[in-house]
Image (cartoon, rainbow, N blue to C red):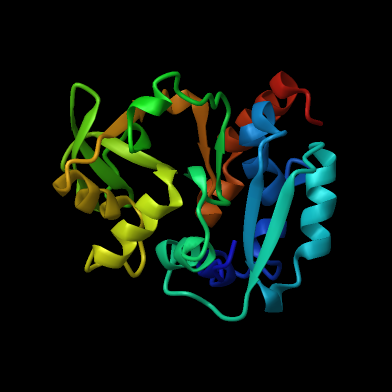
Amino acid sequence: MAGDGLRFKDNGYKKLKPTLEICGRTLFFWSLSSFINYKNDHFIFITRKEHQLKTFIHAECAKLKISNFEIIELDKKTKGQAETVYKVTKDSYLKDLFIFNIDTILTNFNIPIWLKQCDGYIECFKATDPKYSYIQIENSSVLSVKEKVTISDNASNGLYYFKTSHIYNESYENYLQHDFYIAPMYNHLIANKKIILCNQIEQSDLIILGTPAEFEGRDNKEKLLIHAKKKQII
């Protein structure tokens, strides 16, 4: 939530990306609804102070009955998602760190039963579009991750898990190309014998709204309404 949403701005959208409305709710609401089954867990929302989203976040969380959260406002723009998370976690110790974005909805998210068996995992779905990160796997173990290179048909859906924030930060600090993307950071962990797994989900359990075309697509709107009815959230 700390970015500028340039793809939308460049297409004439005036509102901040999290506040854009589709099917009667905001993009923030829909993304957060992915975790409605875990609404008692602790959430951290990272924004930029200049965007003044505190009141908005409180109101949207109330709609989903999420009360255990904190809002961290950054003073300035970061280089990307990886640095944004690092700035917030570098001076703290967090267990079971899940990282997610603002423009994707998971309609059937469940924490894997094997969570304690790994140091991190990436959630993925079948795709071939080069705009995604791709994961090479063997028997569910991640061997390699490439940003925007189709080394397999296992694409990241943007959900990343790290056993602790220490593991995340150690990877960030030692991975030379860490400025923008989180996914390739797992390569450093793999090289250091950490257990990184891939959690496969069905494409039908995923709604991606990262571009104006996806946001405006009729099929995605229909999927959102089905999701809302299933989860009884509107």
User: Which residue occupies 50% across, 43% down?
Assistant: 95
Locate residue 144: give its quadrant. top left
User: Which residue occupies 56% across, 49% down?
Assistant: 103
Q: Is residue 120 above or below residue 6?
A: above
Locate residue 58: give its quadrant. bottom right
Q: Is residue 82 above or below residue 12?
A: above
Q: Is residue 70 above or below residue 227?
A: below
Query: Toward the viewer: 232 or 216?
Result: 232
The reply to whether residue 163 is in sight is yes
Q: Is residue 232 left or right of residue 32?
A: right
Locate residue 12: give its quadrant. bottom right
Query: Toward the viewer: 95 or 234?
Result: 95
How many discs mark residues in the rendered view?
A: 0
Q: Is residue 104 left or right of residue 157?
A: right
The reply to whether residue 100 is in sight is no
Q: Is residue 78 above or below residue 59?
A: below
Query: Where residue 64 sits in the image (x, y, percent)?
Result: 79, 37
Q: Is residue 13 left or right of residue 109?
A: right
Query: Toward the viewer: 93 or 107?
Result: 93
User: Which residue occupies 48% across, 75% down?
Assistant: 78
Query: Where residue 228 sits in the image (x, y, percent)?
Result: 72, 28
Query: Where residue 210 sits in the image (x, y, percent)?
Result: 51, 52
Query: Where residue 166 sits in the image (x, y, percent)?
Result: 40, 54
Q: Which quadrant does the C terminus fall into?
A: top right
